[in-house]
Amino acid sequence: MSVVLDTAEVPSADRAEYWHEAVSRTFVPLDVALLESAPAPATITSHRLGALQVSSVRAGPQRVERGAGLIARGGEDHLTLALQHRGTARLVQDGHQVELRPGTFAISDAGRPFAKELPEPFVFTAFHWPRSAVGVSEEDLRVLTATAFDTGDGTGDGTGDDTARLVATYLECLARSAGSMEPRQASRLATTALDLLAVLAHERRGRSRPEAPEAALATLARVKDHILRHLGEPDLSPERIAAAHHVSVRYLHKLFRFEGVTVARWIQCQRLDVCRRELARPTAGRATVAAVAGRWGFVSASHFSRAFRAAYGVSPREWQACAGTGPMPGAVRLPLPAAVPGSGYGVAV
């Protein structure tokens, strides 16, 4: 079933607000500004294919930012791949800036601050999915975000061009057929698309993920559950975890190599994530950053602050102060062109 959002029949004065609400419902909450005085008609046509949402977006010049306040409102567990068909774009995330032109794509992570500017009328297809649907580590996801992947003649940054072309070709075919698929077929094809993205992530890191036997995956699942249940214990260590599951420390490390991450790094990522969520709650102001960090296993407040900033681009205090209150201090901001006669609200993902 298709969902079509079109501003053509909306009065010009109301288009900006309508567009903003429509896109927030389709994707994630965003701060946006139109780069044109009179908003042109814009459309989004979306299809749901299993875990994957496919949306064709056609609109006029605009800029979008996502900071701590908006991340706290939801959607932080999703990623979006935008395949550019018309117009150019500039994406900034994690200190990286990439330029996109037709025939390239980039991925943005809704869980971390980013900004994107499209200075001219554009068309792109967006593929939106929960991060849990792709079986890759946080480190693998980081190498995918804010990177321009070339799908044309290989004149991009030289990173995985052959695989990028395969991914783009498959996604384009999927998008063209999205409206005519049966649900079961759509789900299977979407799973293949997400598997291809995992291959791209592993290639980008210069390695292939080893295949884990079924027994190892079952043990790994039990180990992860154990870690999550004991996350707040400062002395949670590979030795304790291995002993609790009657395996050697060496075998424990081998299990996490299937994830492409160390045991310690996986524990830290889970602790950071739960701290981030707790600091963003409306009642979080009653707890100090140090108290939250200590509650989830961080012994040193300074180490927690450094790790938090490295993961999310802002300090824990900035995150706590800005969650739910608007743009964050020091967030990436792309300058508006000086000659813009007016602005409103629009979107691009």
Image (cartoon, grey):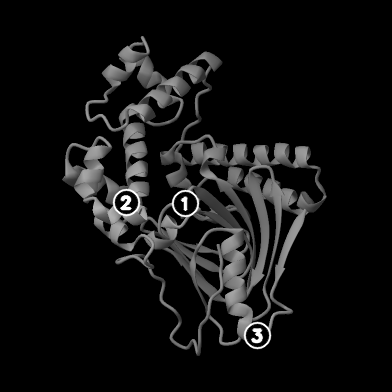
Residue 227 in view (yes/no): yes
Disc 3 crowd rating (10 Å Cα; few below 14, some 14-19, many 20+) is: few
x and y percentages locating residue 325 in the rendered image: 36, 66
Q: Nearer the viewer, residue 74 or 237?
A: 74
Amino acid tagged 2? Leu
Q: Nearer the viewer, residue 247 or 174?
A: 247
x and y percentages locating residue 165 in the rendered image: 63, 48
**Which numbered disc, 2 or 1, marks the residue closer to the eye?**
2
Q: Nearer the viewer, residue 169 or 50?
A: 50
Which element is circle 2 on? Answer: helix
Amino acid tagged 1? Glu
Q: Residue at x 74, y 49 (%)?
A: 173
Name the N-terminal-most of marks 3 and 1: 3
Amino acid tagged 3? Ser
State the CA–CA distance, disc 2 to disc 3.
40 Å
Which label is found at residue 76? 1
- Eyeballing the image, is 337 above or below 104? below
x and y percentages locating residue 67 in the rendered image: 40, 62
Marks 3 and 1 in Cβ contact (< 8 Å): no
Name the N-terminal-most of marks 2 and 3: 3
x and y percentages locating residue 284 in the rendered image: 30, 53
Which label is found at residue 329? none
Q: Which residue does the numbered mark 2 point to in the structure image?
A: 279
